[in-house]
Amino acid sequence: MTSLEIQFKRINTKLSSTWRFGWQIIWRILDWRLFIAPMITYGIYRYWLHTAESGRYPKFILPHPDTVWLRFQEMYADGSLLLHLKVTLRESLSGLLIASVIALVLGYVIARIRILNYILIPYLIFLQAIPVVAIAPIIIIWVGPDIKSKIVIAALITWFPLMVSTIVGIRNVSPQLREMMRANVANPLQVFWHLELPSAMPEILGGFKIAVTLSVIGAAVGEFISSREGLGYLIVVGRSISDPASVFLGVIILTAISLTLYIIVAVIELFLLRWKRAGS
Amino acid sequence: MTSLEIQFKRINTKLSSTWRFGWQIIWRILDWRLFIAPMITYGIYRYWLHTAESGRYPKFILPHPDTVWLRFQEMYADGSLLLHLKVTLRESLSGLLIASVIALVLGYVIARIRILNYILIPYLIFLQAIPVVAIAPIIIIWVGPDIKSKIVIAALITWFPLMVSTIVGIRNVSPQLREMMRANVANPLQVFWHLELPSAMPEILGGFKIAVTLSVIGAAVGEFISSREGLGYLIVVGRSISDPASVFLGVIILTAISLTLYIIVAVIELFLLRWKRAGS
Amino acid sequence: MSQFVLAVENVSHTYTTTDGQVVKALHEVTLCLSPKTFTCLVGASGSGKTTLLRIMAGLIRPKSGQVLLNGKPLRQPQRRISLVFQRDTLLPWRTVRQNVALPLQLAGVDRKKRFMQADQLLDLMGLSEFANAFPTELSGGMIQRVNIARGLITQPDILLLDEPFGALDALTREQLWRELLLIWGRTHATVLMVTHDIREAIFLSQRVMVMSTRPGHIVKEVEVPFDYPRHFDLLTDPIFIQKEAQVREAILADRLSSSRLG
Amino acid sequence: MSQFVLAVENVSHTYTTTDGQVVKALHEVTLCLSPKTFTCLVGASGSGKTTLLRIMAGLIRPKSGQVLLNGKPLRQPQRRISLVFQRDTLLPWRTVRQNVALPLQLAGVDRKKRFMQADQLLDLMGLSEFANAFPTELSGGMIQRVNIARGLITQPDILLLDEPFGALDALTREQLWRELLLIWGRTHATVLMVTHDIREAIFLSQRVMVMSTRPGHIVKEVEVPFDYPRHFDLLTDPIFIQKEAQVREAILADRLSSSRLG
Amino acid sequence: TAHNVQAQDDELTKVTLFLSYIPSVQFAPIYVAIERGYFAENGIEVEIEYNFDEANGVDRLAINDLQFGIISGEQVILARSAEKPLVYVMAWYQNFPVGVVVPADSDIETPEDLKGKMVSLPGFQGASYIGLRALLGSAELTERDLQLVPIGFSAPEVMCERQVDAATVYIANEPLTISQCYDVRVIPVSEYATLVSNGLVTNEETLESNPELVAGMVDALLRGIADTIEDPDAAFEIALPYADLPEDQIETQYQVLLNSVELWRADVLGWTSEEAWEATQQILLETELLREPLDDLSAAYTYEFLPKLPEEVVEEE
Ligand SMILES: Nc1ncnc2c1ncn2[C@@H]1O[C@H](COP(=O)(O)OP(=O)(O)OP(=O)(O)O)[C@@H](O)[C@H]1O
Ligand SMILES: Nc1ncnc2c1ncn2[C@@H]1O[C@H](COP(=O)(O)OP(=O)(O)OP(=O)(O)O)[C@@H](O)[C@H]1O
Ligand SMILES: [Mg+2]
Ligand SMILES: [Mg+2]
């Protein structure tokens, strides 16, 4: 712990508990280590610039950063970028939401009711193992070719890791603590809420770290298959019209979305798992 | 515990420790609950048969089970099925192997060295967030269009969930037990081997449950893009020439591979986590 | 407040370990906790005391025999029965106050009220300063006191304590004896306490039961004739010392009959 | 066997809890463990005994002051120093035997040899039957005995024990006292033992140190003049009783100077 | 001759031919050319790479990682606008292979009838999109006059479930699949517009450094196409081992080959017209896939390696 942090903790003591945690999180977010990544990114940018200007690779393989930046400004100005972003974001978040509900419920019941493990797992793996491309037509017939099909694809790609993480988390709950809850006559909902959920939180949040990135990929994959908007569409069209600037832009923004969602989960984790940092 | 199990345990006592665990596992594998899934599967088969014979869907959407069975026999007889299976299996297992090494090493160092979390995660998410389709060309230019490109794609799809699971597992290691190991002058390798690995095993095995299914999907996706063999190729060709029997066969065998790999992980889990069942 | 009788009838229990060994933990144990009594249970390590308490709390079903609460078989944990665990069973993500308030929260008591009661008990345990600390920030003895506070907060009719004072220094322990007797006097709960300290057992209880080594069963009951409130002078009272010797002898006799300790 | 002196000089330590509170655990503690001595440390719950032991084992660096091993600053845990933890720190995936053998395994002793030694110690602790059990299948007192066995197996030159007998019944405890003194007599290790039982402290040690409540510091040292081997008759020896009263008084005095317990 | 070919083996130039589809009877001419030794006669040994990702082929042609591929005409224009030095040297299909399929009982008979209808297409790029736009353009319709639904390659399923009124498809095979559900009618783009269909594409570097190789490729492929048109049955026999079809698909695929033959058929093979190139570029501009016309559209293709057109032959004489 740095001396600054200790000093900060002193200030903390004067604040109310809720505020304190609020501050602590902001403090952790403003950690100097967070500036390492931007600096490395800048280094990578310089390298990109240098390589692009050296002419080592043709423009259509490695576009000049300025070209991408120009394309960004252009698409930002005419609002199309925002539109693509919104569509993809909506698809992936909706997919994530559906996947989360399904995965958490399934994960919980499978972890708790042993026999379901034997009954359900084969079919769930079947669902997981089918390549999306192979069932895309069926999805389109069922839910229609519009945004719904992409949401379904995003959810399909997302749910499994979250479910497995939930199972691991719930199974990891200490039997001693379970017994303690039972001795205190907790009903199943209370056991879930006061014991299982907080205890499985590290695993579930890990599952969400995987899930958020997958939901974005899922949305993009859905857009690859069929669409007329969204970042996946931007990439597909960019590739088909030999416009690497669009492809780069699409990939960069996709990454930015994934990273943002990941960071959101990481911040939630910082808050929910603060007890893990206690006493060390 | 059934009376049969208790009786079995009595028999157990007379066997040596290793054998005992061996028997225990075989016993658990032969659990009657394992027969539930085949029975349900049979039910699903009947439903499929019924729907296919009703003529509700055209043949190229829902083929008759017999057609698929015939296609299976045909392809089994001429050895092509085995070839496709081998290729896909080789791709996914190689991808899984590469991904495992990378994910476990990365996951471990990120969990242990806090600052790497800040430095590496953004780039790792970038790697994870790029849609495979967008970098497939680069992969093909780099490693060539043959089996290597599919292995790389399988590894790319697989590594992230395994890494996140490893991070969660290693971070979950009890600080008290860490201190105990330190007090006993364990070197880092010993801490890893005797504390961190067994303690993180539930999470890592969960990660592998995700990874094995993803590696199979990854191989198939690689084959979708370009290939001449493998189950993904079988599916793509089936779709292109409107031959649903091949598609169904491909999907069923892909699922079978995933399920087999998953079960292998589950059996390993049964063995490695047997201590978790103690005392309850 | 109505009166509760908890009776254990011919209870036997065995565990089967992973390596197939069958451990006989309890053998035909019979005992009855009359209302408003204070009983102590002493016995060798591993003799089945914790197992008996878990059975009496309705946490595990005995392999044979039964537990009766007011004549009705006890099938599951009851809110009127409170068990203070021997091992650390605090929720690590809850602060001390939240941990102590847990049973009230589960019973649906509102936040303000349950925190008030928790704070009172924490004060009693000398832990007011640590109300907002997490369990990992406490010393061994402090954890045990939080454990006790959590067991007391519901003001149970039947209180089962599993070595509550094991990790406490002599003085804290004696102070908590007093507090426990005060609480007991006020609420007249039925108390069964497992302890390893024979003096503690005699000082606190009306009856000391001695349990034999594996398989555990009650080999001796010693009545303690002193009135409440009791004072520390008692510890040097000849009758006290005689009772102490009695209990000691009972344990020793049992130990001698089995070849080795444990 | 060479001789080791472990000296604590002016050690202070504070913890900062998550809610920003600064807990003064130790305040300028100075003590010296001469070779082949047996010292006991008593003190109120939460007074910093465990913290001191962790510092002496090289597990945490004190905020100020230093620990010297043979005059050289102690920077990290040493194999010749063994610490028996207060809390349950057994590895749940290892059987009892494997847990006890762990320190030898870490030191590179081969399987056969370490298991033989582990089995010997388990026999001493009365746990032979449970060598293949997992920790979750043990009772509280059994876990503690496994803990002790693990601490003894390396035959350390300096042995730090943190309330090793807390969860044990009187008889097992007394039996283990004897075993501990025998082992100590055989190896002449330097022992520092934290305990809450004043009689235990006096019976076992040559010197009892009393620690005050937070911030912990040594308020009194009581020399115990008895020779070894000691017999249980000692417990009724007038000098013994006098020493007991002395220690008791020291704790009490400290307690009175602070307003409330804890 | 087999012995001959063997002896010449090390003199043969190895060439990878990029095809953005799976092994199929639709590539019968290539297999015919291989099996009948047309490539070998020209000193070429062909290895085929099947890859679904056409853009991948375009990029690799551009950096000379590949020398030859069968690529859509509009891809060549788009590639050149991105300064990728691709050159179209020979038409593969004479007739644009895309069309709109409708149920036989549908009231849609001409492109005009598509107005207000729900029409599916794979996506808003690629040959199908260009073809559909050309079709609509011929009826002076814009995208706003009808409802376009992107569905990827799910046209058969979507049509059979009658979720759209019409579907934009590759006319050689997809209508056959849909006809398993009900009778269909096809409105081919080629009847209403002349566009550049896919063809053999190489890059400028290969053209410059090794024109004989290009000539050899074109020659062999054209002979393969001619043979196939002439004797589809024989071509099918040759293609079968390549396509590796399951028994029950052979009949359908034979029909696919016959349909393809109609797309290949021409008086003189391999030619494209300047008008077709202009029209294709025009459509690309209209769809905004292309931002501005190429400086020199004629550089995108060359007739250099093609057999003479009848009128040219006459002129020369
Ligand atoms: N979950 C379990 N699985 C298998 N054996 C168990 C289990 N719990 C307890 N045992 C065994 O049952 C016996 C009695 O255990 P119990 O915990 O009841 O003893 P105890 O009297 O509370 O001892 P202590 O005073 O040491 O806490 C012991 O031999 C123990 O090994
Ligand atoms: N990891 C920690 N973080 C914050 N505070 C701590 C931590 N460990 C101990 N403390 C505090 O330091 C003080 C001393 O703790 P310590 O464990 O050393 O006491 P102890 O003398 O061993 O008590 P006991 O007899 O109850 O075991 C206590 O007030 C405790 O709350
Ligand atoms: Mg117990
Ligand atoms: Mg302590």
Image: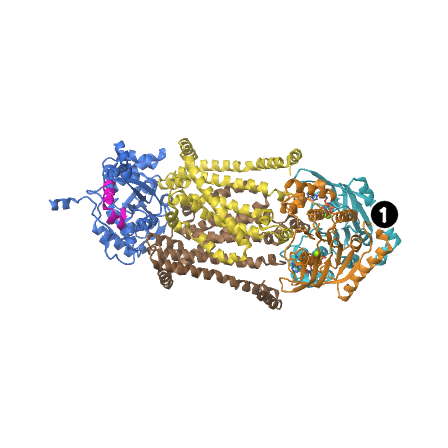
Chain colours: A brown, B yellow, C cyan, D orange, E blue
Judged from this view, the residue extending furthest toward the left is E317
Quadrant of res A274: bottom right
Can residue B258 be seen from the camera position used here? yes
- Identify the chain of the residue marked 1, using the numbered disc in the image: C
Can residue E141 be seen from the camera position used here? no
- Dominant secondary structure (helix, strand or loop) of the stretch shown in magenta: helix
Q: Is residue B245 above or below residue C138?
A: above
Hey, what amino acid is under mark 1?
Answer: Gln
Q: Secondary structure at mark 1?
A: helix
Observer-nearest residue: D223 or B124? Answer: D223
Return the residue at label 1. C246
The region drawn magenta spans E200-220
**Residue B161 position within the rendered picture, expressed as x and y whole percent measured from the top left:** 50, 49
**Residue B84 position within the rendered picture, expressed as x and y whole percent measured from the top left:** 41, 37
Q: Is residue B14 above or below residue A40?
A: above
Is residue E202 located in the magenta-colored stretch of the structure? yes
Judged from this view, the residue extending furthest toward the top is B77
Q: Is residue D258 above or below residue E179?
A: below
Quadrant of res A49: bottom left
